[in-house]
Image (cartoon, grey):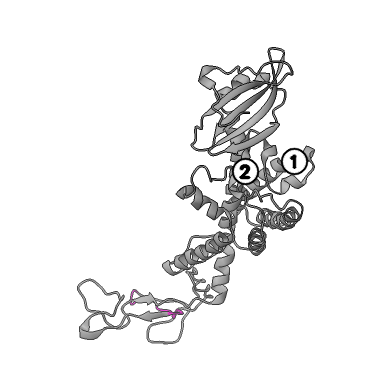
């Protein structure tokens, strides 16, 4: 008896078989001598036959400098792809897709928090929490997404099979189920707020598209539970099917993602600076990283502006302050275009009976378009 053969792509594992001589003779337990190689029947295999003019048929094989003849070699003609095979591939590709989305989402949130220098600037479902809990909720969400994304990658192979893989995938499904409910609540209570899924890119108000995308990812996480360890495609056909499934799912997610339009707008720069929408958090980030802010920060009474307005490509922020025992207002002007946007500052006396005096250095003078 010969042992079970190793399975190949698209073929089931055959059971033990007896040795069979060529010519379909009776099987035997043992083969003696050094004659012709042992043949055994295989599903979806055929012999290379001689084609027209004595040449081999298309894709056939033959020995060196010899004409092809019957029963010389064998090749796989391919196995038709069934619905079960496609379903297995769909379930397998969910793991790397979910891992990539979770890691990218966590990185985008962390980048926004670093630029704003505060986790409280995080948008999304965290704004429905009390103010004292928003920082903790934002930190917990960012950490959970990163941990689950890395966990999905580590348990995708043979290392984390069993309970670790089941726990990570179940936790991922629970995260997306919670996200569906949180986004629905956010849409009802704060209709102007964005989902914050990918940091600054997700400032568009939550819509049914955003909730539908989260529901699709929830179903994807549920379908990944119980998937065996991932392996590389065993044939070109299997690789093509995997790529087709990944492309189809990414297309569906792109249709449901408002961030795609935001990325295309930023890449094309179709809108001029005067009409371009710039988040206020990015203005605060630019201001706090500037030299005028570091120079005049110690004179401010509070870090929160009492007035904010925009004129063209400039955004103006007014802060109360004390300079030389006098109450003043410090007006910062932040340019809204470019990576190293210029920042200007000017001071205005607001104490009664005192003339308006500007205490701005020449290098940091404020060029206002109208009286402040």
Q: Residue at x 73, y 16 (%)?
A: 353
Picture coordinates of residue 36, whole percent (x, y):
33, 77
Tell me if 340 is positioned left or right of 296 in this view. left
**Where's the C terminus, which quadrant?**
top right
Element carrying mark 1: helix
In the picture shown, does residue 320 fall above or below 264?
Answer: above
Specify the segment rendered in magenta.
34-44
Q: Nearer the viewer, residue 257 or 25?
A: 257
Find residue 31 and report its image quarter: bottom left
Q: Are marks 1 and 2 in contact (CB under 8 Å)?
A: no
Q: Which residue is mark 1?
A: 134
Q: Residue at x 54, y 71 (%)?
A: 86
Q: Residue at x 48, y 66 (%)?
A: 244
Tell me if 337 is positioned left or right of 213 in this view. left
Instruction: Specify the farthest residue to the top.
Output: 324
* Mark 2 burial class by Cα count in 10 Å: few <14, some 14-19, many 20+: many
Tell me if 28 is positioned left or right of 117 in this view. left
Picture coordinates of residue 169, whole percent (x, y):
66, 56
Q: Nearer the viewer, residue 213 or 302?
A: 302
Determine if the magenta segment contains residue 35.
yes
- The main secondary structure of the magenta stretch is loop
Q: Which residue is mark 2?
A: 109
In the picture shown, does residue 285 fall above or below 358?
Answer: below
Q: Earlier in the sequence, mark 1 or mark 2?
A: 2
Picture coordinates of residue 247, whole percent (x, y):
50, 63
């Amino acid at each position: 008896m010969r042992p079970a053969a190793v399975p190949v792509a698209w073929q089931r594992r055959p059971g033990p078989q007896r040795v069979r001589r060529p010519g379909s003779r009776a099987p035997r337990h043992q083969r003696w001598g050094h004659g012709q190689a042992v043949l055994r029947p295989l599903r979806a295999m055929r012999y290379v036959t001689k084609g027209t003019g004595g040449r081999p048929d298309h894709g056939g094989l033959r020995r060196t400098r010899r004409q092809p003849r019957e029963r010389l070699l064998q090749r796989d003609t391919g196995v038709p792809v069934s619905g079960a095979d496609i379903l297995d591939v769909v379930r397998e590709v969910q793991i790397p897709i979910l891992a990539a989305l979770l890691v990218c989402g966590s990185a985008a949130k962390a980048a926004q928090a670093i630029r704003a220098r505060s986790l409280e600037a995080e948008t999304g479902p965290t704004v429905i929490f009390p103010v004292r809990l928003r920082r903790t909720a934002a930190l917990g969400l960012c950490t959970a997404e990163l941990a689950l994304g890395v966990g999905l990658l580590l348990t995708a192979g043979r290392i984390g099979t069993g309970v670790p893989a089941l726990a990570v995938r179940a936790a991922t499904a629970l995260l997306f189920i919670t996200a569906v409910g949180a986004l629905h609540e956010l849409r009802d209570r704060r209709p102007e707020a964005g989902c914050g899924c990918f940091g600054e890119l997700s400032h568009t108000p939550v819509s049914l598209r955003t909730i539908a995308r989260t529901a699709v990812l929830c179903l994807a996480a549920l379908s990944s539970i119980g998937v065996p360890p991932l392996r590389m495609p065993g044939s070109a056909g299997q690789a093509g099917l995997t790529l087709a499934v990944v492309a189809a799912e990414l297309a569906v997610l792109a249709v449901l993602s408002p961030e795609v339009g935001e990325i295309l707008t930023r890449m094309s720069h179709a809108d001029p600076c005067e009409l371009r929408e710039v988040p206020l958090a990015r203005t605060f980030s630019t201001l706090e990283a500037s030299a005028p802010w570091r120079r005049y920060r110690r004179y401010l009474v509070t870090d929160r502006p009492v007035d904010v307005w925009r004129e063209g490509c400039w955004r103006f922020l007014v802060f109360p302050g004390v300079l030389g025992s006098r109450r003043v207002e410090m007006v910062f002007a932040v340019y809204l275009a470019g990576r190293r946007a210029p920042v200007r500052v000017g001071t205005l006396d607001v104490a009664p009976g005192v003339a308006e005096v500007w205490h701005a250095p020449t290098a940091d003078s404020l060029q206002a378009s109208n009286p402040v």
